[in-house]
Amino acid sequence: MTAFALAAGAAAALFVGTSTRPTVAATPASSPDFDRDVKPFLTEHCDRCHNEKTQKGEFRMDTLSRDFGSGASAHHWAEVAGKISAGEMPPRKEPQPKAEEAAKVVEWLNARLKEGEAVRLAKREPVSFHRLTREEYANTVRDLLGVTYNVTDPTGLPEDPEWRGFERIGSVLSLSPSHVEKYFVAAEAVLNEAFPIKSPVKFSKRRPAWELRGAGDKKDLEEKGLLDKVRVDMWPGHDITGRAGPGQALPAAGEYRVRIQLSGLKPKNGRAPHLAFYATDLDRMLHEQDVVAPEDKPVIVEFTAHLPAGNLNVRMTNDVPGPSTLPRSGRSDPRRPFFSVKDGRAPWQMKLTDEAGDPLVPFLIVDWLEWEGPINADGPTYAQREYWPATSGDMGQARAALTKFMTRAFRRPVKPAEVERFVAVIERETKSGEKFESAYRTGLLAVLCSKDFLYLVEGESAKPQAAELTDYEVASRLSYFLWGSMPDAPLFAAAERGALKDPAELKSQVRRMLADRRAENFAASFARQWLQLRMVGMFPPDKKLYPDYDAYLERSMIGETTAFFAEVLKNDLSLREFVDSDWTMLNARLAEHYGIAGVDGDQFVKTKLKPEDRRGGLLTHAAVLSLTSDGTRHRPVHRGKWVLESIIGKSPPPPPANVKPIEPTAPTAPKATIRQKLTAHVADPNCAACHAKIDPLGLAFDNYDAIGRWRTEEVSSDGQGANPKVDASGRLTDGRTFTDAAGLKKLMLSDLDTFGAAFCDKLATYALRRATTIDDREALAGLVKQAKAADWRLASVVETLVVSEMFRKR
């Protein structure tokens, strides 16, 4: 039996968890006061719009169950109570109830919801399983074994499903048989690198320009003493494919260093040439950056990348838009080696410089490329030092090393019986004739494929009613919240002391962890999921309409938003910065896109904004504006829905079936904006109620096109005449008005509590790995109250959430 097969069988047995559901008594279906005090109110003020025939918002009151112990029913009743309490229902045009009548109904409903909370708690499963996301898996094996595993490679792990943008919701992260197989393959690859059988043979290879160029007679150039003077001229869009790789199979998985000597010539008031180094087999960008250096003063670009063993195909590109790269209009002539722009050009070749020698297009000049690796340190790996028995065949040492490994892998102390189950795997392997080293690796493989490693396990079947997390469970919840990885030694030590029930200790740990570089995982991951940045580029912009849009700009858009969040977190700034700010984070590419001068380089830097820049806050980030577009035009309804869900925290109901699409403007009619075309939807009574809430929030950003550029008129290909002027004004459902995006942001800042409450809910969803429910209302209200008292400072909000009772309970 192979090690893989045995580990598969062992892990399969260890993977299955059992749980029992306690028997609970249901709450009474109704209360004596319902028919007397509540039903008449609902009949008079609610049933007219939410009955069998009308069902506004696809919501019926006449069939709503009175079982407040049911989560679904309780959620709807909580929504009813909230709308009555806020005065949103009944609508202003309908007869209004007396305040004391409404208060009595809301009080009754809240009391029933509170009674139902205990029943819903009792219905909860005794054990909760939250599978690690693939990002968390990679971070965990890095911290556990010192191994980089690229989960996004084609041979890596499947993409995680998402719920409303969040990729870590336990109930959504299911496990299929093919997924299990992927985990076995991943575990084998990780262990092969963590515990190499022998040290790989290192190599170093330089690929000179004449080889990269693949042109010219080598013997002739050598005889003339010109071979080492050949260079590669890379005009916009030009790539070197096949010859930029290492030129041999990589001997082992590990870190490899690449060095490139080159010059980069940037036109005046133009874009810098952009070096992109892309592994085609892995579908992964290994490195990219702008390069600006004189022809006679080249620079050396150096980077490292973790790569698997085997053959690797690489494409090196000057990744900027430019003239055609077809041979007839390109630069490289196979019969004519390139040495310098001063050597002139063939009559048919594209001009790279003007008469003064200044570049006309951004282009690169490459001298050589060098590969080296693997560059891992000599001697035992981190994993070998930590988890490998000192004496081969010594089962006592193997048991001790395995216990240490399991304790860290399972993120809690392990029981002797648990260890023995994996020791038995090793013993069976040795009895079947396997060498000790192979048998021990099989035991480790089974650990990495067990449920206690792949899942965050909270609760015990033996204690079905236990709601409080143990200290070790709190440690894991906290580390995967802020680092997306396993707890470190100080956090384990605090759990061992039983100190994580102390709010002061939790605050201290949060401050320490936010100061750690691993907190960058939280800044990038939470921002991406909260704001649904995964959708950026889902509909690639039309190249004819947006010729300047490229992959680097797209990555820069996302980079601005995640860097912005990181800056707010690092400096403990207020949540109001997310709504509006007088700064943002820019690199040269995005600054050029926005028309903002004075920003150079690839790194994102904090940049002061002027009023005429018309940026600030998240809502006018190009990433947000483009993710709510369809690649050809902006979509105000989708933009409004995004603001309503992500910023205000309310999800509109789905649109009615068979909604007519927006009709194009007739060829003989004047050109019209999308706003004007939406008028028909607003007039439809089936659509008007929702559009009144959604459309103003999207139309406020009509001054920004599909890729986030500012404009004052809407370019239209339908109809005739001049392009219509943009109208970004609007009216909210509460009667407040604004003239543009800046005006809407001011209104939102004046009601920061609404955004603050929505943000706290999103943060809790991310931290708890589940959707919040009505049973979290009081805890969320307390979090919002404390966050407001702390002036909504982001790091303080995080700290308050961690010390809350909600965070420390299942």
Image (spheres, helix red, strand yellow):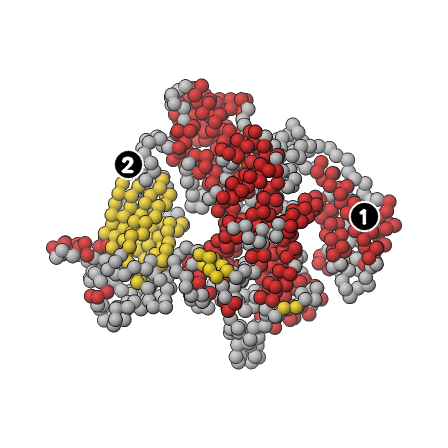
Q: Pointers 1 and 2 in contact (CB under 8 A)?
A: no
**Front-lying residue, 493 or 268:** 493
**Front-lying residue, 606 or 466:** 606
Q: CA distance from mark 1 to mark 2?
A: 75 Å
**Front-lying residue, 325 or 400:** 400
CA neighbours of label 2 inside 10 A, class few (<14), some (14 to 19), many (20+): few
Residue 120: quarter of image:
top right
What type is the residue that disc 2 sits on?
Val
Quick check: can you spot residue 441?
no
Residue drawn where x is 37% and y is 32% of the image: 381
Q: Quadrant of the N terminus?
A: top left
Quick check: can you spot residue 463?
yes
Residue 497: quarter of image:
top right
Residue 769's place in the image compared with 444, above or below, is: below
Residue 776's place in the image compared with 594, above or below, is: above
* Residue sitting at the far right: 36
